[in-house]
Amino acid sequence: MINLKINLLALLLMCSTFYGQDYEFGEVSVEELKENKYPLDEDADAAVLFRYQNTYYLSGNLVTEIRERIKIYSKEGFQHATEYINLFDGRSSEETVGRIKAITYNLDNNKIVTSELDKEQIFKSQLSYNYKQVKFTMPNVKEGSVVEFSYKITSPFIWNLDDFRFQRDIPVKEIEAEIRTPKGFNFKKTHRGYFAFRPTIETKRDARMGMDMVVNTYKLSNIPALKDEPLVDNMNNYRAGVMFELVSIDIPGVLTKSYSHSWEDVAKNIGSSTDYKKELDKTKSFDDDLDILIAGESDKLKKAKILFKHVKERTEWNGVDGKYFQHGLKKTLKEKKGNAADINLLLVAMLRYAGINANPIVLSTKDNSIPFFPTLERLNYVIAHAKIDDKDYYMDATDEFSNINVLPIKDYNWGGLLIDNNNKVWKHIYSIKPQKALNRYSLKANLTADGSMSGKYMARYTNHSAYVFRNKAKDKDDETQITNRESTFSGVEIDEYLVKNIDTHEGPVVESFDYEFEEGVDIIGDKMYLTPTLFLKTDENPFKLEKREFPVDFGFPVIDKYRFEISIPEGYVVESLPKPIAMALPEELGKFKYVIDNKNGKITLSITFDLNKAIVSSLHYGALKEYFNQIITKETEQVVLSKNTDGTANSTGKGR
């Protein structure tokens, strides 16, 4: 890539080109200001009336000019009056933004009043190790305001074209985006999202450059908002837009070179870096400590567990992603803090020192998006991999509660690249998948004749369910936990709350408490109507849209097993029970089983909810939505108890 930059600089250094349709800044109409609803989406809090984006080469840099006009319809739309500009900081060179101009327009007695952004209202901050952020909020924003801004981003990273994102969280009325590249610079364009579009492509001669320019222009209108939905890996993966990747340069007599590569090529590229080729073998800084730590232990898996725990306890993640060192092994150990690469590459180095076959795996986390094609730039993270007795073990020591083969959920995204320089293995692997969590719930309840109920709740969480529980409960005392659980389990009063094994990353979490519950029974005449799932019933279907274009991401597969045991009050018998049921999702994605019985004065209910895959395709969305509808219906069905009139106690009664 360095050679590419040099070649591009040679071609572009003397060029000054700017192309863009001439739009007058500031021509906001009274009609725009009077509009109180977006015609195509009357619930929208705001809408982009117009956006123009122009990307071109100028004097050896990549320049992007932005202009945008937004209508604010309600107070909830005020958030769209703040613009965030993220700029890559490569330390030796960085992106910059300039020519920021911003105006808010309001109506006052049917006259347009303007409020201009002051330079002191522009704020700069270090967003992360590699990104700076420039932020400004439009002044004097009200319901009905129109805001308009423009700015120019200059980037020295001329091989790296940012994505064009056309779809927003609010509707877009009109957008025009243009990119101009020298003819012979061949870019692969990957469209994403579910809003159809295509560019117009033409070639124009630039006399100053002495070469033709390829112009890709995108003109779109009436783009619907991308509505946020539950259980999505990253909404940005599904926004309508286009990604660009330089695959070759073919300029006859000047330069002919291919940059098209496979995932193996990307893995080799990373493996050839100093961090992976040399730094990983610098183990002198920790050899004495490790010798003591693993002395006398010959089992490699036990060694791996010892070293994994050691790195987790010895270092702290600074919140910065990274596939390359920020500090390096020695400095990370000294400062006890580092980015993801510092910590997980340190773990790889320690595992190797202990004689374990360990290597890095480079990936893109869920919050970073899915890499749709072989690319170096779109990978942002690294974890550790060990091969022991022909079994794979994956580790991420950045998280307090992660475990071996229980990674932070963000790590399960598309797989990753194995970088094994020692054995000359560089490949994409897809086997990084979360294990199924097994959770068991037990509820015992004593029902009284006045309809009140008390009992004991116990739950046991494993794998990622335990991981999620620990992270949610982190730094919370029992009183806070009780408040949270009472909020989750509506109508329940909790006492004797106890949770075990919560402060470690290993093993299951066990939770228990005593409870009183007064909302589980309705009494009408001489009958009681009891919902046997008590306060654990599913109340709401998370899937509300009629159609969904993108997959459902549950995070990890799970099997939940519930057992309810409810003692019937003296003087009552079971008149009717819900029917047992078993149903399944297509392609063995999951199943639900409901079995209820009544014996010896007790109602017993067993429920199994089994989800076999973490990610369910949108093709099965309709079946998944109906599946949850049926579960909700079943879990709200009632047991009918009636007063015993024949003198026998707690007779069985008839099921329906």
Image (tube, helix red, strand yellow):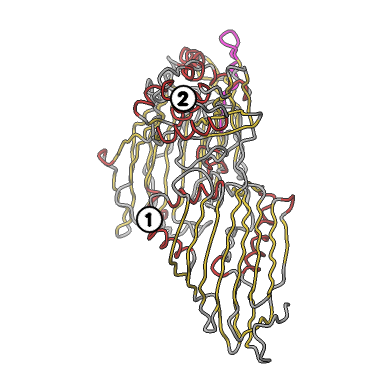
Q: Which residues are magenta?
A: 243-257
Picture coordinates of residue 633, whole percent (x, y): 64, 68
The residue tagged 2 is 324
Residue 613 falls inside the magenta stretch: no
Q: Position of residue 435 (x, y in %)?
A: 61, 43
Residue 248 seen in this snapshot:
yes
In the rendering, at what x and y percent does residue 597 appear?
A: 69, 72
Taking 371 as reference, is 252 above or below it? Answer: above
Identify which residue is drawn at 51% across, 26% down: 296
Work out whether mark 1 precedes mark 2 in sequence or the reverse, and give the earlier one.
2
Q: Which residue type does callout 2 highlight?
A: Tyr
Q: Which mark is residue 414?
A: none
**Does residue 327 appear left or right of residue 540 in this picture?**
left
**Quadrant in which the C terminus appears:** bottom right
Residue 614, percent across and down?
62, 47
Numbered-mark total: 2
- Classify mark 2: residues with Cα within 10 Å, few (<14), some (14-19) or many (20+): many
Marks 1 and 2 sit apart, C-alpha to C-alpha, by 38 Å
Q: Residue at x 64, y 34 (%)?
A: 430
Residue 532 placement: quadrant: bottom right
User: Is 251 colored magenta in this rendering?
Assistant: yes
**Residue 209 visible to an observer of this rendering:** no
Q: Find the residue positioned furthest to the top.
A: 253
Depicted 153 relative to depicted 230: above or below:
above
Kindly report the secondary structure that dominates the magenta region of the rendered protein: strand
* Number of other residues with Cα within 10 Å of mark 1, as a class: few under 14, some 14 to 19, many 20 or more: few
Q: Write down the residue under mark 1.
A: 477
Q: Secondary structure at mark 2?
A: loop
* Amino acid of disc 1: Asp
